[in-house]
Image (cartoon, rainbow, N blue to C red):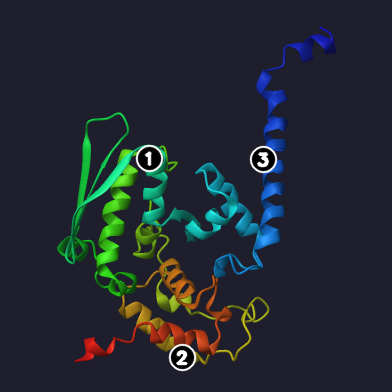
């Protein structure tokens, strides 16, 4: 058997694989070009500023949902390596595909959202109440406490969107709000606040990314004690909340400034009317 015969009988997949890799590489190069051009602008959320690789990944993922680059960076959120969309963005994607989602009831303590897949007679209806949120363990979470009604709507609308059109959302398992509330973590992923504040080796500790005095150990202990009291015991949960509060993504407590720690602590201070 000649070499020519061997080549003629090779599986088609063997010769197609390089083209798949080339296409992926081309897409990544294009996304990197766009990311490098916009990550330093005010149109990009703080957690993508100066991070072209993360921005490029978000742009690529967003493209699969039909988003342009700026929309991808504005709407996509990642907590603990899990990509997610805020519920309103999930609803927008589902509506853009011709499906229907509408609100049936909208009260301070109860939200009911319904949805119908295009071409189907079945109506999916989801209700989230304060009592249901308590059972799920959300009411002790700081993100829930900031705006419980908005969180109820987020859960109801996100659930409906995923149920009627999982294909439109590429099977996204969670909304950003759910990840912020602690969903999608397992016992092996949970890290206590005490572990989160454990100092890193000096030669690996990154300097704060913003000009400012480093926080004291006492400030950090107080911040993580408050986070723990408010249900943010997991490392991913704590990092997600802190990043959202200070307006930029962080991977370690060593990146925080004294002012940023104060900002996080202030976010838990009750409004004047709540102290009466």
Q: Which residue lies under the disc numbered 2?
A: 219
Q: CA distance from mark 1 to mark 2?
A: 44 Å
| Cα separation between marks 1 and 3 | 24 Å
Q: Residue 185: x percent and y percent?
A: 38, 59
At mark 1, the secondary structure is loop
Front-lying residue, 12 or 272: 272
Q: Which residue shows up at 27% across the image and 90% down it?
A: 272
Residue 107, image quadrant: bottom left
| Picture layout, residue 123 above or below residue 254 | above
Task: Give the vertical position of 59 relative to 250 (above or below).
Answer: above
Q: Residues within 10 Å of mark 2 (few under 14, many from 20)?
A: some
- Asked whether residue 117 appears in the rendered view, the answer is yes
Mark 1 or mark 2: name the one nearer the start of the chain: 1
Residue highlighted by disc 3? 24
Say which residue appears at 31% left-offset and 58% top-offset: 154
Label 3 SS:
helix
């Amino acid at each position: 058997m000649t070499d020519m015969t061997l080549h003629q009988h090779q599986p088609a997949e063997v010769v197609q694989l390089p083209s798949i890799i080339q296409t992926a590489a081309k897409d990544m190069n294009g996304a990197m070009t766009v990311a490098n051009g916009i990550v330093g602008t005010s149109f990009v959320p703080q957690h993508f500023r100066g991070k072209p690789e993360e921005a490029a990944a978000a742009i690529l993922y967003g493209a699969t949902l039909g988003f342009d680059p700026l929309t991808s960076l504005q709407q996509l959120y990642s907590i603990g390596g899990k990509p997610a969309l805020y519920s309103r963005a999930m609803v927008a994607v589902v509506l853009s595909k011709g499906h229907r989602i509408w609100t049936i009831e909208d009260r301070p303590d109860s939200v009911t959202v319904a949805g119908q897949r295009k071409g189907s007679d079945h109506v999916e209806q989801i209700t989230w109440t304060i009592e249901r949120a308590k059972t799920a363990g959300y009411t002790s979470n700081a993100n829930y406490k900031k705006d419980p009604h908005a969180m109820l709507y987020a859960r109801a609308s996100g659930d409906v969107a995923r149920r009627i059109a999982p294909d439109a959302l590429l099977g996204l398992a969670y909304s950003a709000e759910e990840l912020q509330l602690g969903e999608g973590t397992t016992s092996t992923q949970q890290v206590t606040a005490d572990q989160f504040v454990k100092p890193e080796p000096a030669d690996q500790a990154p300097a704060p990314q913003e000009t400012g005095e480093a926080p004291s150990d006492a400030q950090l202990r107080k911040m993580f004690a408050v986070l723990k009291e408010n249900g943010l015991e997991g490392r991913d949960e704590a990092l997600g909340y802190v990043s959202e509060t200070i307006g930029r993504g962080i991977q370690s407590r060593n990146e925080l400034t004294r002012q940023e720690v104060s900002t996080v602590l202030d976010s838990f201070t009750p409004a004047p009317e709540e102290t009466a």
